[in-house]
Image (cartoon, rainbow, N blue to C red):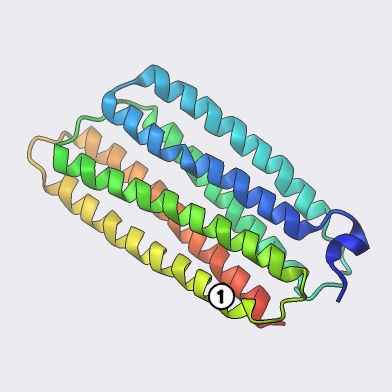
Amino acid sequence: MKDLGTIFGESPFELVTALAGKIHECVALIRPIADAVLAGDMERLRALQDSISRLEEESDVIKDRARQKLPRRMFLSSQREDILAVVRQLDRIGDKAQNFAVAASFRSLSLPSDVAAAFLELVDKVVQLSECLLGLAQHVASLQKEGFEGRDIDETLVRIESVYRMEWESDRLNRQVARLYYSAPGIDPITVILMDKLCLSLGQIADHAENAGKNLRLMIVRN
């Protein structure tokens, strides 16, 4: 099977990988954003919010290019809809990362040390999940050049399982953080509401990352 790039020029698989990379740049900013909101550094927070907005706009350009590179009739080992599904999930990850940045800009957070530590652990897990998804997308793009054949498929399925596992871990951490800030004495209601918003965005990022992994798995098992 010919590589898509030799038939249509720029391969949408390569653009999906580029999109995953740009989306990960957005997600990677969540940790410094969390640090800034906990430190009450609103100037730093506004700069980071501008950065994540710019990256999200750049990801939209890549997303549109990827969609344009998918003709209605594709001579591909994967269905057009499978690739579009991955693109949609990646796009939603970027949207939720931006939502996190916007919510973080509402006000600084004063959290007990144990709650802050658990919150940052959750943030780090979500960033790691995004990095894992990026590695998976890069691996699938490489596998596509071989027509989704060979022993690398087994390795790919293991990578996908890692995405699933990390989503489950982030979900568990999310519940733990919620228990902590709901039960901590002295936390004001506005802080609880803001933490709900931040943790919701983190959970949605993890969910969409898992969905992207499922879409990539379907892309492989159908061939």
**Image position of 188 with respect to 128: above or below:** above
Image position of 91 with respect to 39: above or below: below
- Residue type beneath disc 1: Glu
Is residue 10 depicted above or below 36 in this figure? below
Kindly identify the residue that appears in the image at 34 percent across and 27 percent down. 36
Drawn side of residue 215 relative to residue 118, left or right: right
Q: What's the residue at 23%, 51% (across, down)? A: 178
Image position of 205 (left or right of 182): right
Kindly identify the residue that appears in the image at 75 percent across and 73 percent down: 78
Instruction: Establish if 223 lies above or below 103.
Output: below
Residue in the foreground of this view, choosing between 141 and 40: 141
* Quadrant of the frame with the N terminus: bottom right
**Location of residue 74 in the rendering, given as x and y in whole percent from the top left corner:** 86, 69
Identify the image quadrant of the C terminus.
Answer: bottom right
Q: Is residue 11 left or right of residue 17?
A: right
Which residue sits furthest top? 43
Percent x, y of residue 218:
63, 76
For disc 1, the marked residue is 155
